[in-house]
Image (tube, rainbow, N blue to C red):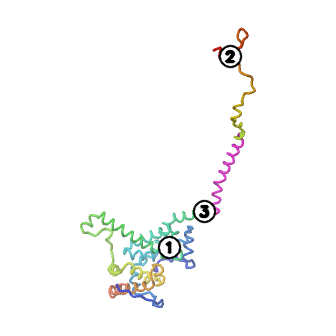
Amino acid sequence: MTSHQKIEDPRFGDGELVRRAREGEEEAYALLVGRYMRPAYLVALSVTRRHEDAEDAAQEAFLVALQRLEECRDPERFGGWLMTIVRNRSRNLLRRESLRETSVLPETAKSGEPLPDRVTERSELDETLQAALAELTPVQREVVLLHDLEGWKHREIAERLDLPSGTVRSHLHFARKALRGKLEGVLTDHVKG
Amino acid sequence: MNLIFWSSESDDDRRDTQVGSWLGELDPGRDDATYWMRFHRDVVDGSRFELARRRQAAELTVVGVVSSWSRTLVPVALAAAAAAGIMLAQPRLDQVEPPILVEDVLTMGLGDPMPALFVDDEEGGLLLASEIY
């Protein structure tokens, strides 16, 4: 994720930014959003496994977090608190969608045709990757995405996902192993190309 | 489920570049250079109302609270002073006559002349009023 314009200022810690955001300072809040938008998206993606849902859940989570900022008891650990909100919003979103799909089933679905919103032009690469990720547990997906894609350290993941450091390493090990098993040889050429 | 636990912080904490490059396919900003900028803008724009509400709330500092109280208290104090003035200008309730005592009732009129219980008859004799009726 290097293609976006970086919206970050490392001079300020989370604690200070949270305190300023509580006063309604837009710049502080914007820095927090810039700092955590990609991890929030990745955590949401780990749960929902769909881009559109992950985007919605992550964006909703930021608004909910701002509304409940006083409930963040340790502003220095804003990241972990936010990830909990992201995870909960993602699960709620999935629950709402599953209810909607079972209660209002369109004719096309009843007849076995694909739902219009499911019809996406997904590349072979994307499908293979999605299938490999589906084999992992949500927490394994979170850990491997945050470590190998977002670049978080074991310690940061442990702190922000509220997991023991050894458990983070364990999840990372098995997630990598599973992905390699599924993707090696299949994706390597695609990605290189 | 088999779990492997590491106890040392000295284990390799580097990114797995191959896995990272596979997972990079999931990055919506990979093929859309402005994706994360738009994401950021959408989130911040969507939070403007809440941020404005927080700024308003933050303006109610101690001084703000005191001044807002004084804005309410001054007219109330003025009204109370006016009411007190009106009450003072009216006759005082403790200036009413003292209550009539039982002793006063019993001795009342003792020094007054006797009522006309007797009337003179035509012959100059006295008749009791009761004898007239």
- Name the residue beneath numbered marker 3: B60
Q: Residue at x 57, y 63 (%)?
A: B57
Query: On the rendered image, what quadrant is the N terminus of chain A found in?
Result: bottom left
- Name the residue beneath numbered marker 1: A33
Do the residues under discs 2 and 3 have CB atoms within 8 angstroms?
A: no
* Residue A192 visible in the snapshot: no
Q: Which segment is the magenta one? A: B62-90
Do the residues under discs 3 and 1 have CB atoms within 8 angstroms?
A: no
Task: Depth check: give the residue in front, B39 or A87.
Answer: A87
The magenta stretch spans residue A114:
no
Task: Depth check: give the residue in front, B28 or A139.
Answer: A139
Q: Residue at x 25, y 66 (%)?
A: A110
The magenta stretch spans residue B75:
yes
The image position of residue A136, as x and y in percent, is: 35, 81
In the rendered structure, which disc, 2 or 3, sits on the residue that comes first in sequence? 3
Q: Which mark is residue B128?
A: 2
Circles 2 and 3 on the same subunit: yes
Do the residues under discs 2 and 1 have CB atoms within 8 angstroms?
A: no
